[in-house]
Image (cartoon, grey):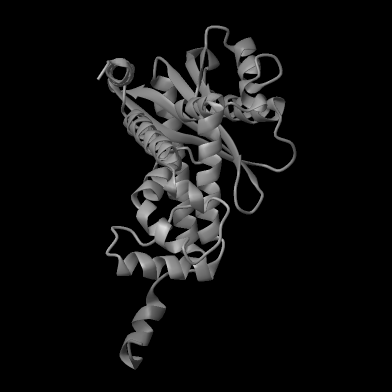
Amino acid sequence: MFGEDNVQKIKNNPLSNSIVSRRIKYMSVDIETTINERIKKSPFFSIQVDESTDVSDLSILLVTARYLNVNELEENLLLCYLLSKRCTGEDIFNVIQGYICENEMDWTKCCGACTDGGKSTSGCYKGLRGRIKIVVPHVTWSLCCIHRQSLAVKSLPDSLKELLNQSVKVVNFIKASSTNTQLFKFLCGDMGSLHTTLLLHAEVRWLFRGHVLTRLFELRHEFLMFFEDHSFTLSSKFYESEWLKQLAYLSDIFLEINKLNLGLQNHYITIFKVTDKIKSMITKLNFWESYIKKPV
């Protein structure tokens, strides 16, 4: 690539086969040591624990720590560990406990722990929550806000639950077939639509609910045209005004909750900002409710 004149210059460079990987390892060790030292100096710290399975069926434990560094809150990844055997509350606690003891951190400085709604992490007796309480009785436990709202959707009225399921079936009818996907894309292009593709709904991705429903409502006229040439059991729903009203309602509510969720997700957000955003959302909901009940 460089010619014969530069061959000797390249040979004189003291490079080995592992120098890049070795330097990456040195950098990661230095970053980990710096974070651990800052946590030790901090008067308190909190942790957020998440255990999930990736696409290769490996259970990964992620622990994020928030601490005080020179009068400023910092948030960094503390631990990433592969759970090769079981994923019980005891196993998760032993991994975190072993890491904290190995790096000589003080458990008593832990003031808060945030987890999802899984039994292995939120259980008050055998779960991670209960085991941390034994070591640090004063620790405050909280449930992840996104998981909290994901659980709230299970208490929706039956009619809205059914509408959500029907919306997913409509989207899957098109997305599950490459032919239907292409035909729907060409139809949207011919009609000059803002969108030409649909979004897939995923149960674990709460923020996607609002986007899926909004896209479905915005393309309701395109669906009417598409189902004229394709028989589908739910095609008649797009002629029902009540069904469309409920779809628009769910779309708007989910998008507003999504905005709140995104506003709560920030590395340096404080309890004061979170409280203001939540109070503002509650005020909006009360106002909308009173406006709906107001006689025309």
Residue 160 in the image: state x and y as whole percent.
50, 32
The residue at the point 34 percent across, 50 percent down is: 218
Residue 231 in the image: state x and y as whole percent.
55, 61
Residue 103 in the image: state x and y as whole percent.
54, 28
Residue 34 in view (yes/no): no
Q: Is residue 106 above or below residue 205?
A: above
Residue 204 in the image: state x and y as whole percent.
54, 40
The residue at the point 37 percent across, 86 percent down is: 7
Q: Is residue 230 above or below residue 122?
A: below
Q: Quadrant of residue 89?
A: top right
The residue at the point 52 percent across, 12 percent down is: 139
Q: Residue furthest bottom?
A: 4
Q: Residue furthest right?
A: 85
Q: Quadrant of the N terminus?
A: bottom left
Return the residue nearer the eye: 57 or 295.
295
Return the residue nearer the eye: 69 or 59.
59
Number of labelled discs? Answer: 0
Looking at the image, residue 73 sits to the left or right of residue 58; the answer is left
Return the residue nearer the eye: 215 or 139.
215
Looking at the image, residue 291 sits to the left or right of residue 125; the answer is left
